[in-house]
Image: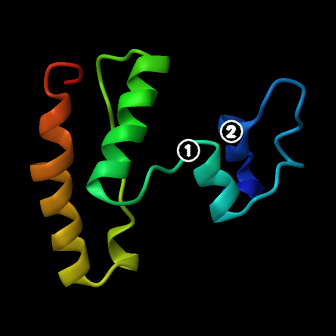
Amino acid sequence: FFQPFGFNAAITRPGEDPFTVENTFENICARGLIICGSPDTVNRKLEKLFSDIPCDYFWTMTYQELIPQKNLMRHLELLTHKVLPNFTSKIK
């Protein structure tokens, strides 16, 4: 999905060609472009991200049409109740 447009450039390491980076879900997650997991895992990953790269604004994206509505509603509930409240003093 990401590779044809060169979006893998967001996860390349110095000296890597974005068009040769392995384009798998596991690799994109391992390199931090996708943050997923339990609320505790997501909290830890976001804490590290904001520590490594301080920012004022943070944008989340969910492929809503790919997730059954029941699962999507649970995802949004966990995100808004168990994750984002931990970062209200760090991001807008």
- Examine the rendering and report whether any part of residue 1 can be seen: no
Q: Is residue 83 above or below residue 48?
A: below
Residue 82: percent from the left, percent from the top?
A: 15, 50
Distance between the Cα atoms at labels 1 and 2?
7 Å
**10 Å neighbourhood of mark 2: few (<14), some, or many (≥20)?**
some
Horizontal arrangement in the rendering, residue 47 relative to residue 31 (left or right): left
Q: Work out whether 85 lies above or below 24.
A: above
* Circle 1 Cα neighbour tier, 10 Å, few/some/many (<14 / 14–19 / ≥20): some
User: What amino acid is labelled 1 in the image?
Assistant: Leu
Return the residue at label 1: 33
The residue depicted at 15 percent of the width and 19 percent of the height is: 89
Q: Is residue 8 left or right of residue 89?
A: right
Identify which amino acid the numbered label 2 is placed on: Ile
Earlier in the chain: of badge 1 and badge 2, it is: 2
Q: Mark 2 = which residue?
A: 11
Residue 83 at what x, y percent from top left? 21, 45
The quarter of the image holding the N terminus is bottom right
Q: Residue at left 76%, top 35%?
A: 12
Observer-nearest of 33 and 19: 33
Check the picture and name the quadrant holding the C terminus.
top left
Does residue 70 appear to the left or right of 37 in the view shown? left
Q: Pointer 1 and pointer 2: residues touching (CB < 8 Å)?
A: yes
Q: Is residue 55 left or right of residue 10?
A: left
At numbered mark 1, what does the secondary structure look like: helix, strand or loop? loop
Q: Nearer the viewer, residue 5 or 75?
A: 75
Residue 46 in which image quadrant:
top left
Q: Nearer the viewer, residue 35 or 47?
A: 47
Secondary structure at badge 2 equals: helix
**Would you identify the image quadrant in which residue 91 lies?**
top left
- Residue at (33, 60) in percent of width and height: 38
